[in-house]
Structures are given as structure tokens and as C-alpha cells.
Amino acid sequence: MAAPPRISYVVGRLDRAISQKLEQAVAVHGVTLPQYTALSVLRRRSGLSNAQLARRTYVRPQSMLQVISTLEREGLIERTPDANHGRILRTELTPKGRTVLAACDRAVTKVEHAMLADLSAEQRDALLAALLSCVQHLGAGLADV
């Protein structure tokens, strides 16, 4: 009898599958998955610098510059100089960005509902709690969730 797969392997497969499905879901609304992630982070924490946003979205600073440039060009975010440090630009969602983010959220909710279709509300809550615990034990953030 074969040994069951390692949890880390299953989580990795799930990560790849989710990324693929989410990329397809948000593309309909004109954004990439890294752009959607950045918009989502900015909703929770407005005014982040490029470096802060890169850390919170797990994107290299160079890649974040591309993400930010595209989002700004599309009118989904705006950047303003920091009041105390003129070289730092603070990033915020625009009304158009909030509209696109809301549409993407609805598409992402459909993906999540399909993924979790066989789980009860209690199982979903337990899964979320377990995953958050795993993330926190690995020092990957989400302590403020």
C-alpha cells in the first residue's frame, strides 16, 4: 500500500491549482493574479510603499514596480508622495480600482465555493483556522487576520 501524500505536497498542488483558477477568474476583469493580490492588500492596508506592498504580496520589488505601473496606468491605484519622506510614494485604490476589485472578489468567491463545495461551514472554518496556524508557524504573516 502506498504511503499517503505529504501535506506539503498536497498544499503545493492546491496552491498551483488555485493560482491557475484565480488567474483565469480575474483575467476576465482585466487584471493578473499579482495585480489582484496587490489590490486586495491595498484594500486592507492603504498607503503602503512599493517595498511594503512587495513584501505583503510575496513579489520581488522589481516585479512590484511593473504591477504598480500597470495598475496606475489603468487608473486602479494612485500614488502620492509621503508627507515625511518625499522619495516614498504611498499607494491607494481609486474608485475604479475598488470597482474592479469588487468584481474580481465575486469571481474569486465562485472559485472558492467550487473548491469547498463538499465541506460544511464548520469544516470550512476549521480548515481556515488550520491554514492560518500553519502560515503563522512558518512566519509567513497573517497575524492580524
Image (cartoon, rainbow, N blue to C red):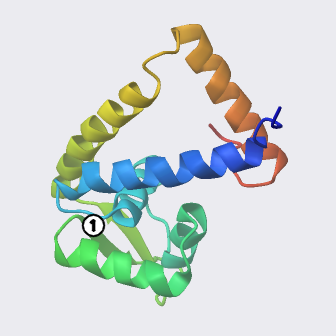
- Looking at this view, is 5 or 20 the one in front? 5
- Looking at this view, is 73 or 91 the one in front? 73
At label 1, counting other C-alpha atoms closer than 10 Å, the crowd grade (few under 14, some 14-19, many 20 or more) is: many
- Looking at this view, is 136 or 76 the one in front? 136
Q: Is residue 82 left or right of residue 69?
A: right
> At x 41% / y 32%, what residue is drawn?
112
Residue 21 place in picture, x, y as percent:
36, 48
- Looking at this view, is 50 or 29 the one in front? 29
| In the depicted structure, whether residue 62 falls above or below residue 99 | below
Q: Is residue 48 left or right of residue 126?
A: left
Secondary structure of residue under mark 1:
strand
Residue 31 place in picture, x, y as percent:
25, 63
| In the depicted structure, whether residue 64 falls above or below residue 23 | below
Name the quadrant of the C terminus.
Answer: top right
> At x 15% / y 56%, what residue is drawn?
96
Can residue 85 be seen here? The reply is no
> At x 75% / y 41%, what residue is drawn?
5
Quadrant location of residue 125? Answer: top right
Residue that numbered label 1 is attached to: 77
Name the quadrant of the N terminus.
Answer: top right
Outermost residue, front direction?
1
Say which amino acid is labelled 1.
Ile
Q: Is residue 23 left or right of residue 18?
A: left
| In the depicted structure, whether residue 87 falls above or below residue 24 | below
Residue 46 place in picture, x, y as percent:
43, 57
